[in-house]
Amino acid sequence: MISTLTNNLQIESGIELMSDEMEYHRLGEQNWFVDVMDTETHFMVASDYMKSRTIDNLTRVLKHGKFVTGEQVKVITTDGLKGYPRILRKAFGVNNKFKINPKVQHNIVIASERGFNHKIERLHNTIRDRTKIMRGFHGSLESAKAIMKGMEIYYNFIRKHQGIENKTSQKEAIPKLTLSTNKWLSLIKLSKT
């Protein structure tokens, strides 16, 4: 219900997005949580929990990130996953052979060479702290997706971040959206209108 509202909000982002994936084991299978985060506002602009990290699945997540941020993004930082150049070409037109000057640059950070994507790795630590007590998301894939969508909403609209002066990501990314003290209730009411 709330996700219908939050998935369609346009944000005021910085110029850089970070994308990464987390591996989960559910019912003896390898699953993935893929997320895209704005480095300036700490807003998780797109995410999905999926069975496999195919080119199409990752492209879908990044296309949603582009939809939410519009034309504000100039740099996308990822790890060294070999599929990212193709994914970013499909989602953002990065390194498209028909564009002489691409609007978006791809920045690859390989941990063994230049360190980690610290901001998104910090986000992953926060998510792992919450999900490690959930015993591997036993149940359906849809319930795991719902839990992770709830975590995204909590991270963006409820949780305060020290890195942005103890504000929520929503206050930085969507300053026109005002929520009351009970932010969950405000989001429920807004999603009904």
Image: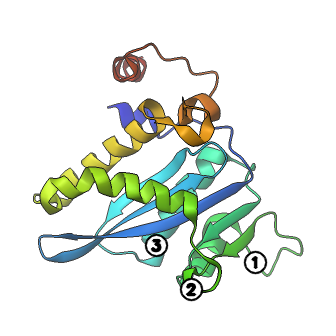
Please identify the residue farthest to the right as the structure is shown: 100
Relative height, residue 17 to residue 54 (above, below): above
Relative height, residue 127 to residue 160 (above, below): below
Q: Earlier in the sequence, mark 3 or mark 2?
A: 3
Query: Percent position (x, y) of residue 138?
Result: 10, 60
Quarter containing the N terminus: top left
Looking at the image, residue 146 sits to the left or right of residue 95; the answer is left
Query: Percent position (x, y) of residue 132?
Result: 22, 58
> At 56% across and 86% down in the image, what residue appears?
112
Marks 2 and 1 in Cβ contact (< 8 Å): no
Spatial CA span between label 3 and label 1? 18 Å
> Crowding at label 2, few (<14), some or many (≥20) Cα neighbours within 10 Å?
few
Query: Percent position (x, y) of residue 41?
Result: 62, 42
> At 68% across and 38% down in the image, what residue appears?
12
Which label belongs to residue 56? 3
Could you tell me the amino acid type at mark 1?
Answer: Asn
> At 64% across and 57% down in the image, what residue appears?
17
Could you tell me the amino acid type at mark 2?
Answer: Ser
Marks 3 and 1 in Cβ contact (< 8 Å): no
Query: Percent position (x, y) of residue 179?
Result: 48, 17
Looking at the image, residue 57 sits to the left or right of residue 110; the answer is left
Q: Nearer the viewer, residue 99 or 122?
A: 122
Instruction: State the image quarter where residue 162 is shown.
Output: top right
Looking at the image, residue 91 sits to the left or right of residue 168; the answer is right
> Crowding at label 3, few (<14), some or many (≥20) Cα neighbours within 10 Å?
few
Q: Earlier in the sequence, mark 2 or mark 1?
A: 1
Nearer the camera: disc 2 or disc 1? 2
- Which residue corresponds to mark 2? 112
Could you tell me the amino acid type at mark 3?
Answer: Asp
Spatial CA span between label 3 and label 2? 27 Å
- Which residue corresponds to mark 1? 95
